[in-house]
Image (cartoon, rainbow, N blue to C red):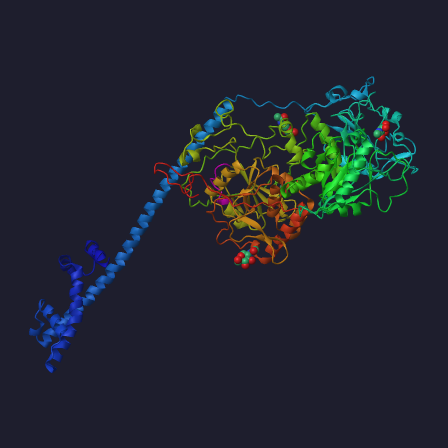
Amino acid sequence: MVGNTYEALPFYHSGTGREMCQWLTHIKLSRIIILTSIVLFIVPLFTHYYLSKVESDVPDRDMYRTFSTLEAFEDFTSMKASQLKMRIEEMFRIKISVSNELRDLSAKRQRLQSEVNSLTQKIDELKQELLHQQTDLDRLKISVEQAQVAQKEAVERNTPELAPPKRILINTLPIVLPSTNPRSCRMYNCFDHSRCALTSGFPVYLYDPDQFSVVSPGWDVDGFLKTTIKQTLGYNPHLTRNPAEACVYIVLIGEALSLHQKRNQRHNKALDIKKLQALPYWGGDGRNHILLNLARRDLSADSGNIFSNLDTGRAIVVQSTFYRNQFRDDFDLIVPPILGPPGGDVWQECAQMLPARRKYLLSFQGEMRTFMGTAMTYQIDDADIDLEKLIIDDNNIDAFIIQHLKDMSNGITLDKFFIQFECIPASMESKPVETLDWSLCGTDSSRRAILKESTFALILAPSNATLLTTSFMQARLYEALRAGSIPVILGGDQILLNYNEVVDWRRAVIFLPKARVTEMHFLLRAVPDNDLLTIRRQGRLIWERYMSTAQGVVDTTIAVIRDRLGIPPLPASQTPSPSVFNESFVPLKSDAIIAEPEAEESLGPLEPPYPSPAFKRNYTTLLIQNHEIWNDWMDPFNLYPQLPFDTVLPSDAKFLGSEVGFRPIGKGAGGAGKEFSESLGGNYPREQFTIVMLTYEREQVLINSLARLYGLPYLNKVLVVWNSPKPPVEDLKWPDIGVPIHVIKAPRNSLNNRFLPFDAIETEAVLSIDDDAHLRHDEIMFGFRVWREHRDRVVGFPGRFHAWDQNYHNAWNYNSNYSCELSMVLTGAAFIHKHYTYLYTHWLPQAIRDKVDEYMNCEDIAMNFLISHLTRKPPVKVTSRWTFRCPGCPVSLSEDDTHFQERHKCINFFSQVFGYMPLLNTQYRADSILFKTRIPHDKQKCFKFI
Ligand SMILES: *[C@@H]1O[C@H](CO)[C@@H](O)[C@H](O)[C@H]1NC(C)=O
Ligand SMILES: *[C@@H]1O[C@H](CO)[C@@H](O)[C@H](O)[C@H]1NC(C)=O
Ligand SMILES: *[C@@H]1O[C@H](CO)[C@@H](O)[C@H](O)[C@H]1NC(C)=O
Ligand SMILES: *[C@@H]1O[C@H](CO)[C@@H](O)[C@H](O)[C@H]1NC(C)=O
């Protein structure tokens, strides 16, 4: 090394010491050094030797050898002392001169070295620049190609956009028509569809119950219902005040209560049919009228059935009790009684879902009353019962059932039963009601206590099979579902439950014919825990959504009729996105761009903004996915622009007729990294994503994060949610990143703002990101591509999990330790579907959003709960190679201990609200396909690093 450097020196040599130059060019410098050192070190040694030799005759062999070596250079011994001195001095001079020269040379060397360095660096930079330009060029080429495809598509669109027809509203009141036979009513012959165009939005008119009373003198509509129904309908978006444009007219009839408290009043005297027929828009036959007769307090047998034997014309009857021959299929509607609050959160009413098996396997509390008001007694004399004979006689089969259940609960089994056929203490004064159905025993809270301890709740269908449904049975169903006790209906084949048109009750209730009573115990024991909990969860979903509150019952009733007519719901309301800047203010721009270190990788075309197509499936979602809407995703009340569950075309469709929007990889031929980076591929048409970033008074951190987004492919827009009440400083320079940056003035400082369904979000994919998160472009791209295949899940980077804390308090802990299993992906850097922002804001129990505000924490946990609850799927974690927090950024508040403590509390609180822990574990992470695969060098990987 040293030699090499010195060898190079003569070439650069110049300036001082030029006289040495000739000499130096002749003799290699290394030799000079050797020579000089020999002279400098050996001569004194020699002198010493010479002197010592005079004194002693003992030859030192080593010295002697050195001496003889030196002789080869010069014969020092023959020199005189003065000559020697001169020689030494001369040598010293040479030494000084040489060392000066050396110092000089080394300084020069350093200078030149640094020059070389800077030049190589420049070369590197130029190379880099070339690569950059090349990438930019490539990217532009791709972009141009994509733009050409898009243009071509626009030109030769094979299915031109058809504008929906104008909202057609009828503008006349119903004309009077002669009455038809009401018994044969179905939608096709009794409903006037001309009042309800597909695009009408289904306007609903309510006769004000105070103004238009239809009950007989001496009766009144329950005051609570009157106020509540008026109020809840006021919140329903379908309500109209203009009777001329209405599609349906709602008449609130009950629960009708006798003002004189004479309980022996027959309920079918409650309705004044003349008043009903005199309603201003009755039109002679009551078509498109909905008679809402809700049960609330009086739940005995057929009490609520005030229409039996009355001519209600073509009006749709909505109540909880029907005779079999009275109920008109797919025309009348069975609803649950109103037993809950007007609206709001109901989760506190519910029992926790676990453990799967409770103290009692089965419970029943009820009493059958005779005409005379005494409890009916059954006599079973023989052990040998003639079942055939019993089946013919309804009462006898009930007697057999009761006897069997009694035997079962007293029999030798480890299962516990709570079976009570006579109310203890005997209920109230005897009520002379017909013995058509069972009545409830005990108080609401005593029954609730038993039900909370029961795995299954027995419901006996009415003994008199002419009853199709009774408010008692519906009330019992309500209580069972609320307590998480799975309803088992003996005689389930002879009855109908509420909203049976749309609700798939078989997923929440066990229906058994009465004849199966002897097999019931076996069957119930055969239900495994996982199914128990699935059934229980489904029951609770149905209960919460459709039965628990007056609002739920009213909204569901309207939604079922609308659904029958094939009219889509009204669009879900979005949150306006007001800019934080006023109209006259133009924010300053800056050109500062923070280039990504991996920017030489071409990740995709830069396109003009392309919002996701919206509201394409207005009329088909409720046909194709009706079952899921009512029973899985649980929102039949709103129309969404897109769903994470939208249907997929088969992959040949994108080559045979349905090409529009698709960007297959290599035009369908496939390909490795190069072709991959040029098109989105996948099963869905092209799309872009929106970045939503929440920020609070960290302007520079925010600006840096924004600047890093420059040149990000498929980015549609950036929304910055400005949580601070102070507007941004006026001289803040906003980077120009090629897509709009929309800064939204948040209504108030809340972390829930991160998930508001802003109308400015025009894409399905939303990348939720912290203002200090530093994701690389390739990571974002990969995340986006993975999300496109898991549109219903959280797809993102920081994984966390919920850990069971057995040692301390048998509860959940939030955990961010290294782990091979995760159950949450934090929304500090994750893709979610915009649909979930609606649900987070309008569907999630308010208590959860309140908790987020209380702690200023946990909104990301809440989103994971919501999505896992709805989909029963864990989140998807994508590739690991990334840097979450930016170095040098201020330490975020999430590091301190209270933050963690709050997150423990959130997890436990949220799972209480849901009634179970919805999070699911996963041990899986997504990496790109050719990651860590050996590929030929003429091929590219999907991504260079991930
Ligand atoms: C679907 O409904 C939405 C919201 O009402 C409306 O904006 C859109 O035009 C409708 N689309 C079609 C194709 O009818
Ligand atoms: C069932 O109820 C109907 C109507 O109240 C009644 O006419 C019939 O006799 C009852 N049947 C039995 C078996 O009690
Ligand atoms: C708009 O905002 C700027 C800066 O915040 C302020 O100086 C200006 O007065 C505002 N203009 C109006 C019309 O409010
Ligand atoms: C993470 O692991 C450490 C060490 O194993 C442990 O002390 C700590 O309690 C863990 N953190 C949590 C939140 O469980």
Check residue 124 for magenta coloring. Answer: no
Whether residue 580 can be seen here: no
Give the camera-side residue of 884 and 585.
884
- The quarter holding residue 292 reads top right
Give how far across and how far down residue 547 sits, in percent.
74, 38
Q: Which residues are magenta?
A: 706-714
From the viewer's perspective, tell me whether residue 84 is left or right of residue 594. Answer: left
Q: How many marks?
A: 0
Is 486 placed above or below 212 here? below
Check residue 708 for magenta coloring. Answer: yes
From the viewer's perspective, tell me whether residue 432 is left or right of residue 931. Answer: right
Give how far across and how far down residue 940 sits, in percent.
38, 37
Image quarter (top left, top right, bottom left or bottom right) of the C terminus? top left
Give the camera-side residue of 455 and 631.
455
Whether residue 248 can be seen here: yes
Give how far across and how far down residue 51 sits, in percent.
12, 79
Is 190 placed above or below 556 here? above
Ligand 4 shows up in which quadrant of the image?
A: bottom right
Q: Residue placed at 69% from the left, 33% from the top? A: 503
Q: Main secondary structure of the magenta part?
A: loop
Q: Residue furthest bottom?
A: 55
Give how far across and how far down residue 232 sits, in percent.
76, 37
Give the camera-side residue of 550 and 419.
419
